[in-house]
Amino acid sequence: MSRQLISSGSPFEPEIGFSRAVRSGNRIEVSGTAPIRDGKVAGTDAYEQTKAALEIIIKAVEAAGGKASDIIRTRIFLTDMSLWKDAAKAHGELFGEIRPASSFIGTSALINPEWLVEIEASAQIED
């Protein structure tokens, strides 16, 4: 089974020892994805940050040979669970028709205190 590493170009990837995504066979796993656009935190609200993180995830899945509709699971980590509806709105706009299995998980903090959300995803490419 082949293994393909997908990089976002982040300087943290080699330092920490991770890839934005890894494809193994028909499976793609996307690492925890922060809301970063052009090297800066994307927006100050959960809606904009969720949208940015999901767009990065879709781009990584596409770089691994998949498409958004191959995403079968998302895990949305929020530093404030009262913001779940804002995150859910962005998720619904991008995945309303795809409807992957999804979890909203509260966490006390993320690496950058400006991040309100970080998202992981799994995809399965059909033969």
Image (cartoon, rainbow, N blue to C red):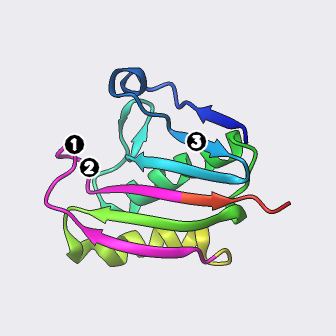
59 versus 84 height, above or below: above
3 to the left or right of 31: right
> Are the residues flagged by discs 3 and 2 in contact, CB closer than 8 Å?
no
Q: Quadrant of residue 39?
A: top left
Element on which disc 2 rests: loop
Pick whichever of labels 1 and 3 is earlier in the sequence: 3
Number of other residues with Cα within 10 Å of mark 1, as a class: few under 14, some 14 to 19, many 20 or more: few
The quarter of the displayed image where residue 104 is located = bottom left
Tell me the amino acid under the disc marked 1: Ile
Q: Amino acid at mark 3?
A: Val
Q: Is residue 39 magenta?
A: no
Q: Nearer the viewer, mark 1 or mark 3?
A: 3
The number of callouts visible is: 3
Q: Mark 2 — residue?
A: 115
Q: Residues within 10 Å of mark 3 (few under 14, many from 20)?
A: many
Please state the extent of the stretch shown in magenta in the rendering: 99-121
* Residue receiving disc 3: 22
Q: Nearer the viewer, mark 3 or mark 2?
A: 3
> Vertical placement of 11 versus 74: above or below?
above
Mark 1–mark 3 CB contact (< 8 Å)? no
On the rendered image, what quadrant is the C terminus found in?
bottom right
| Residue occupying the point 73% across, 55% down | 67
- The answer to whether marks 1 and 2 mark residues whose Cβ atoms lie closer than 8 Å is yes
- The residue that label 1 is drawn on is 111
Report whether 118 appears left or right of 21: left
